[in-house]
Amino acid sequence: MSLRLVVLDTVSLVSLLIAIGAGLVLALCAAIEASNIMLARRRLRGITAPGLVPLMRTYVRERQRLLRHLRAGVSVSTVTMTSALIVLFDGVEWTRVLLAAAVTVVLISSLRSASRIVTLSRPEGAAARLEAPARALQLLLRPLSFLLSAPTAVPLRALGLRGTSEAIDPAEELVGTLEAADEDA
C-alpha cells in the first residue's frame, strides 16, 4: 500500500481554502444562532424608557437583528462554499462561478427578505394561510433533516452532548433579560 501525494494547482488550492473558510463561517453562524439566547445575558443597549415593555421590545429587536445578520451569513457562506467546490471538482472558470454566486446570493436574500416582510406585515392572516403549507413542509423535510443531521448528531449525542432547542426555557430567557435590565438600573 503506497501513499500518493496529491498536488493541487493554484486554482484548486484557492478553491479548497475558500470552501474551508466558508465552512468555518457557516459553522460559526450556526453556533451563534444556536446560542442567541445568551443575548438576554448581555446588556441591552437603546432602552430609552424604564419598564418591561421597552425592555422586551429592545430584546426582540436585538434578537431579530442578530438572526437577520446570521441568515445573511449562512446564505453567503453556503453559496461561497458551493461555488468553490464547483471550481475545485469541475474546474469551471471562476468568473462564471462568481457571477452565478452573486446572482444566487441576491436572489436568496431578496426572497428571504420579501417573504419575511410580507409575512410580518400581517402576521395573523399569514399564520392562518401558512399553517397547512408549514405542516406539509415539515412532514416532507423532517426525514431529510434527520438524514442530514444524523451523521453528526448521533456520534455527538453518544459522547453525551445533548444540545437541542428543547433545552431552552423561555422563563429562564425572560429572567435573564430582566436581570440584565436590573444591572443597568
Image (tube, rainbow, N blue to C red):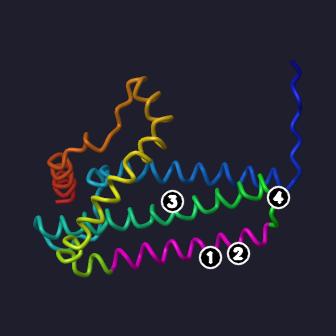
Depicted 12 relative to depicted 161: above or below: below
Pair 3/2: label in front: 2
Residue 170: where, in percent of width, then height? 18, 49
Q: CA distance from mark 1 to mark 2?
A: 6 Å
Amino acid type, callout 3: Val
x and y percentages locating residue 153 in the rendered image: 44, 35
Q: Position of residue 3 (x, y in %)?
A: 87, 25
Q: Which residue is mark 1?
A: 103
Do labels 3 and 4 touch, CB within 8 Å? no
Instruction: Find numbered disc 2 in the image and state the secondary structure of the residue it sits on.
Output: helix
Q: Are marks 2 and 4 in contact (CB under 8 Å)?
A: no
Callouts 1 and 2 close, C-beta under 8 Å: yes
> Quick one: quadrant of the N terminus?
top right
Between 113 and 139, the residue placed more toward the observer is 139
Instruction: Identify residue type, mark 2.
Output: Leu
- Magenta-drawn segment: 94-117
- For marks 3 and 4, give the CA distance: 25 Å
Please name the residue that numbered disc 4 is placed on: 91
The residue singled out by tag 2 in the image is 99
The answer to which of marks 3 and 2 sits earlier in the sequence is: 3
Residue that badge 3 annotates: 74
Question: SS for tag 4?
Answer: loop
Would residue 96 be counted in the magenta stretch? yes
**Alpha-carbon distance for marks 2 and 4?**
15 Å
- Picture residue at 65% right of the left edge, 69% below the top: 101
Q: Nearer the viewer, mark 1 or mark 3?
A: 1
Q: Residues under labels 4 and 1: Cα distance?
A: 20 Å
